[in-house]
Image (cartoon, rainbow, N blue to C red):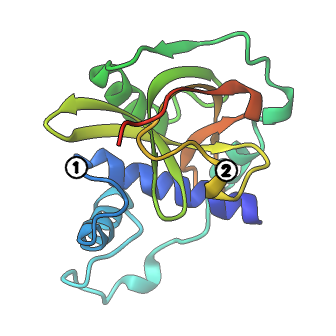
């Protein structure tokens, strides 16, 4: 259950990152952006401004199809040497495309290699590319078997990782990365 909660939080962090994430998780004003982003990216979230008379009709349980997708990939059995997609450092457009197509399910079970910047959020991490002027975008990732974010790369570190696209019970996707497939290339300068 903890693993599913971690994956869900990773994907929510990815949604926040997708909306022109312009700062690190230490920004004090990012909370209001996160809550409004969640309602834009999740059709099951209803804003306070919307008419709530039909709120009983919102299906919060995953469909049978979505539930099946959660068990379609066992990260322990994946051959990480067979990479389906590689994103080079600084390729903003490629990670933007990946993010959009990944959430549509086009990369389910595919092995992805990314060279980018690791970013820690409150409960998750993302690997991102920087378009410049602070405009960053990325996808969530989780190190297999690692729940403590203190054991993840330093915020802002350049990393290379290889992971498989997995989805949780709500069909929210992120990368599952074995510990031996995550390498810190360069620590951030202070």
Q: Say which quadrant the C terminus sits in.
A: top left
Q: How many marks?
A: 2
Quadrant assignment, res 173: top right
* Mark 2 secondary-structure assignment: helix
* Mark 1 secondary-structure assignment: loop
Tell me whether circle 1 and circle 2 mark residues in contact (CB < 8 Å). no
How far, Cα to Cα, is label 1 from label 2? Answer: 24 Å
Instruction: Determine the residue positioned at 54% across, 56% down.
Output: 124
Quadrant assignment, res 6: bottom right
Measured along the vertical axis of the image, is residue 84 above or below residue 77?
A: above
Q: Which mark is residue 151?
A: 2
For marks 1 and 2 on the same chain, the one whose residue lies earlier in the sequence: 1
Question: Residue 73, can we see it?
Answer: yes
Residue 19 image offset from top left, x and y in percent? 25, 49
Residue 157 image offset from top left, x and y in percent? 46, 36
**Residue identified by numbered label 1:** 22
Instruction: Determine the residue positioned at 13% across, 37% down.
Output: 133
Instruction: Determine the residue positioned at 74% across, 51% down.
Output: 146
Instruction: Determine the residue positioned at 37% across, 36% down.
Output: 189
Q: Say which quadrant the N terminus sits in.
A: bottom right
Dot 1 surroundings within 10 Å: few (below 14), some, or many (20 or more)?
A: some
Asked whether, in this view, residue 56 is left or right of residue 54, the answer is right
Q: Nearer the viewer, residue 67 or 154?
A: 154
Question: Residue 63, can we see it?
Answer: no
Measured along the vertical axis of the image, is residue 176 above or below residue 39?
A: above
- In the image as oriented, which residue stretches furthest toward the right? 77
Residue 71 image offset from top left, x and y in percent? 78, 44
Dot in front, 1 or 2: 2
Dot 2 surroundings within 10 Å: few (below 14), some, or many (20 or more)?
A: few
Residue 39 image offset from top left, x and y in percent? 32, 67
- In the image as oriented, which residue stretches furthest toward the top? 82
Measured along the vertical axis of the image, is residue 105 above or below residue 61?
A: above
């Amino acid at each position: 259950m903890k693993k599913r909660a971690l994956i869900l939080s990773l994907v929510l962090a990815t949604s926040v990152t997708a909306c022109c994430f312009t700062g690190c998780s230490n920004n004090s004003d990012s909370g209001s952006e996160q809550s409004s982003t969640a309602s834009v990216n999740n059709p099951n979230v209803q804003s306070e401004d919307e008419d709530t008379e039909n709120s009983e009709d919102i299906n919060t349980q995953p469909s049978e199809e979505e539930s099946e997708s959660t068990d379609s990939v066992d990260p322990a059995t994946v051959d990480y040497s067979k990479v389906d997609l590689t994103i080079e450092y600084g390729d903003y457009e490629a990670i933007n495309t990946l993010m959009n197509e990944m959430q549509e399910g086009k990369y389910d079970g595919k092995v992805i290699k990314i060279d980018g910047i690791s970013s820690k959020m409150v409960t998750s991490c993302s690997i991102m590319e920087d378009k410049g002027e602070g405009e960053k975008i990325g996808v969530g990732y989780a190190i297999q078997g690692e729940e403590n974010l203190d054991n993840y790369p330093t915020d802002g570190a350049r990393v290379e990782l290889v992971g498989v696209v997995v989805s949780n019970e709500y069909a929210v996707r992120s990368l599952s990365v074995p510990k031996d497939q995550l390498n810190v290339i360069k620590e951030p300068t202070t």
